[in-house]
Amino acid sequence: MASDTATSLKVERKPKLSETVVAALRKQLHAGEIQPGQKLPTEGQLTETFGVSRTVVREALAKLAADGLVEPRQGAGVFATEHISTMFGALAADMGAKDSIALNVLEVRLAIEIESAGLAAVRRNAAQEAAIQEAFFEFERLLLNSEPTGPADLAFHRAIASATNNPFYVEMLDVLGRRAIPCDVTSPWSTELAQSDVYQRGLQREHLAILNAITAGDAEVAREAMRAHLSASQQRYRERLHARQVFYADSVKAAATE
């Protein structure tokens, strides 16, 4: 009975129009029908091709840009990216919004950002240190205004990567894009808990420990602060997944007894 009920609760979500456009364009990019560096059709042409509005087309192009597959050029149009990590970006995009992916992303970030923090502590220049501080205080401003902190969170970590003076650290974060911040309100994995003031305050305290270590030029402390921050994020996300599983199980049981 409970099994039948669980099955009946599954509802197939109808894809958004923009997702259909994204899938079609991504397929063309992967197949080489649109070559790296080649200009994509104009918004008007895409609107006519797919039979959708310009708003839908723009949303689809923004998604492809966030995944590193295309890049807009001021006054020239949108072009297929020639970035060397295009295929990695495509792989990340294909992962979709599966819950398990958030943990995978955090695992990759652990591998990248612990050393990134250590290098930033000893290699950063004054301008780069200021950029890290500015991102930290922008997070604080957004938090006080009850606005999504994801962009500032990503900017903080990206500024640290930039301060390594090794462009590949920045490149890896850019490939992950918004997936690098699983708790961002715009992320597929965002939850009300993740957007709570208490939760965000905890993140900011961890950010402060990283910032202080980098400012002090202490590479080992910076590495440990980053490790603690990302490991704590992993644990928080595991707890949210468990809570979701318990909620679903309780819902199924309740439905079965009705």
Image (tube, rainbow, N blue to C red):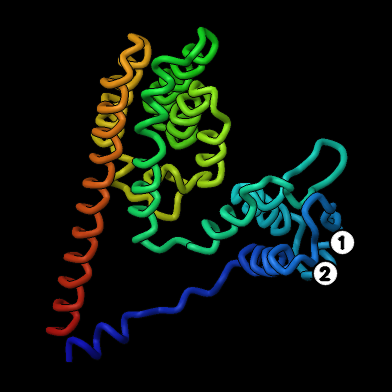
Query: Is 231 drawn above or below residue 13 in the view shown?
Result: above
List x then y, in percent, for residue 252: 20, 77
Give the residue displayed 44% in from the left and 30% down from the top.
Answer: 157
> Which residue position holds label 2?
49
List x then y, in percent, for residue 92: 52, 56
Q: Check disc 2 and report its element: helix, strand or loop.
A: helix
Q: Is residue 104 left or right of residue 127?
A: left
**Mark 2 touches mark 1? (CB < 8 Å):** yes
Q: Quadrant of residue 54?
A: bottom right
Q: Is residue 92 left or right of residue 235?
A: right
Report the quarter where the C terminus lies: bottom left
Give the residue displayed 24% in from the left and 61% down from the top.
Answer: 244
In depth, the one of 222 and 99 nearer the eye is 222
Q: Is residue 156 left or right of residue 50?
A: left
> Which residue position holds label 1?
45
Give the residue displayed 75% in from the left and 61% down from the top.
Answer: 53
Amino acid type, callout 1:
Gln
Give the residue displayed 23% in from the left and 53% down from the top.
Answer: 238
Amino acid type, callout 2:
Thr
Report the quarter where the N terminus lies: bottom left
Q: Is residue 197 visible?
A: no
Q: Quadrant of residue 188?
A: bottom left
Q: Is residue 8 visible?
A: yes
List x then y, in percent, for residue 61: 70, 53
Query: Is 251 drawn above or below residue 170 in the view shown?
Result: below
Q: Check disc 1 and report its element: helix, strand or loop.
A: helix
